[in-house]
Amino acid sequence: MSRPRNESKFRLFMQENSLTLFTVTGVFIGGLIGFIIKNSTGPWTKREIMYISFPGELFLRMLKCLIVPLLVSSITSAIGGLDLSMSSKIASRSIIYYLLTTISAVILGICLVTTIKPGQGAKIEATHIESVDKASKVLTPDTLMDLVRNMFTDNIIQSTMFQYRTEIFENTTISPPLPMEEWDFKGAQREGSNVLGLVMFSVILGTTIGRMREKGQLLQDFFTTLSEAMMTITSWIIWISPLGVGFLIAAKIIEMDSIASTVQSLGWYFMTVMLGLFLHGFGTIAVIFFLGTRHLPYRYFAKLSQVLATAFGTGSSSATMPLTIKCLDNLGIDPRVTRFVIPVGATINMDGTALYEAVAALFIAQVRNINYSFGTIVAVSITATAASIGAAGIPQAGLVTMVMVLDTVGLEPKDVSLIIAVDWLLDRFRTTINVMCDALGTILVNHLSKKDLQKVDRLNAEPHELLELGANGHDTKE
Ligand code: ASP
């Protein structure tokens, strides 16, 4: 008797968790194949690596293609479906969570890097990277102002493809050279969606539709249906994730430099960031989650593992967003909460990135033997928070916004090249933490908003009930 029962339990478990198991297996098999190929055959050319990553690239392209329509339709329909007071309650709870977790991540990073001092006495060679040279010609005020400019987009169609960026030109013909403040500058458009602008626009559009009531119903239905259609496509793409993630990881491992030499020079730095991410993900977030819900979050980890594996494989919170929403829907989280907290969180809430920015800036200061005061540490905390908000949810975006944090410590922006060797790997881990914090934040905000949402549902149902009663009454009279 007990055997068939066990068998059916096993079958049920497999039915519910097969995709998660496949994706996690995809990560391990991809990693294993990558290591075997890397160690058994000679160096691989860029083209050969491109062939290997091709299936993964296709998976990534499919996910990326959903980002803009999903982001706009989800936020607009979520906010449009709520009244102003309810959406501001959800928004303020989310923003308090984002700020609380980001600031605690930065503080944790600073505590670790100043205690462990991974940069003291380290001898590291800087790698010359062209993109870093380009990024170096940026001033902190420009980076911050570009962030705000991007929030207030002047062209919503353009925002789906480009983002604003100030470019600075140094006049090298003048001697003595002009100070940076006197360099010429102009606004330019950089490739990549302006997600901040799209989020802001969708919030405002959703609020307006909500206020228009019946008149806005057509638009509300349109965005709700679009969001549902995107989720249906996501549920198809999800089935490719084990293969996609596996190929992406295998290609990345074949491409990377010798691990041994990297670990030798950057080992302590790597370990400090990893320890920080671990303590933040499993400690700080768990405490915040417990205080809000009276439950520990660990039981959700297994359920989120498919999303976490995808975040690790793609190194992109934005690309993982459709899967995160789908997974939270499956967990029974209210879609009105998920569709606001996840897209906004994937754009501005990056705890792992914030922690890494703080650690990396002070690590580079230690390598360069620069003494930093308490005032500098406070400035690093603020700029690291801003840098994580400004970083796009794409691979290694944190490295670009790091320039701003380095400027705070009085370091040359080019010094980011000191940590570039391990950045791709750290990026995977910090993206996983970014995505995990967004998902747990959604569960927390959902818990805190449950009663309010039920009240909204009751109030929405009442007019219909009255209407039905009225209609019934009329019918009876006739
Ligand atoms: N790759 C990270 C993300 O998408 C951003 C970063 O830290 O570079 O969340």
Image (cartoon, rainbow, N blue to C red):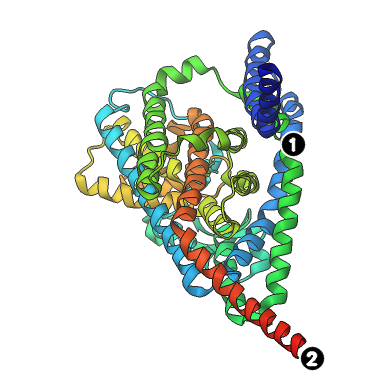
Q: The N terminus lies in which quarter of the figure?
A: top right
User: Where residue 370 is drawn, which disc sits there?
Assistant: none
* Secondary structure state at the residue bearing disc 2: loop
Residue projecting furthest to the right: 478
Residue 305, position as x, y percentages in the image: 57, 33
* Secondary structure state at the residue bearing disc 1: helix
Amino acid identity at mark 1 = Trp
Q: Which residue is mark 2?
A: 478
Instruction: Please state which of the two labelled residues, at mark 1 or mark 2, is closer to the viewer.
Output: 2
**Can you see residue 248?**
no
Left or right of residue 183, residue 78 in this image: right
Q: Is residue 89 above or below residue 276?
A: below
Place residue 242 in its image quadrant. top right
Dot 2, how many residues are within 10 Å of its Cα: few (below 14), some (14-19), or many (20+)? few
User: Where residue 239 is drawn, which disc sits there?
Assistant: 1
Q: The C terminus lies in which quarter of the figure?
A: bottom right
Q: Is residue 244 above or below residue 467?
A: above
Residue 216, position as x, y percentages in the image: 67, 78
Dot 1, how many residues are within 10 Å of its Cα: few (below 14), some (14-19), or many (20+)? some
Residue projecting furthest to the front: 477
Residue 154, position as x, y percentages in the image: 59, 72
Taking the spot 44% from the left edge, 31% from the top edge, the residue there is: 419
- Please state which of residues 140 and 433 is positioned toward the viewer in this rendering: 433
Q: Is residue 99 above or below residue 395?
A: below
Residue 213, position as x, y percentages in the image: 62, 80
Taking the spot 66% from the left edge, 60% from the top edge, the residue there is: 160
**Can you see residue 378?**
yes
Q: Earlier in the sequence, mark 1 or mark 2?
A: 1
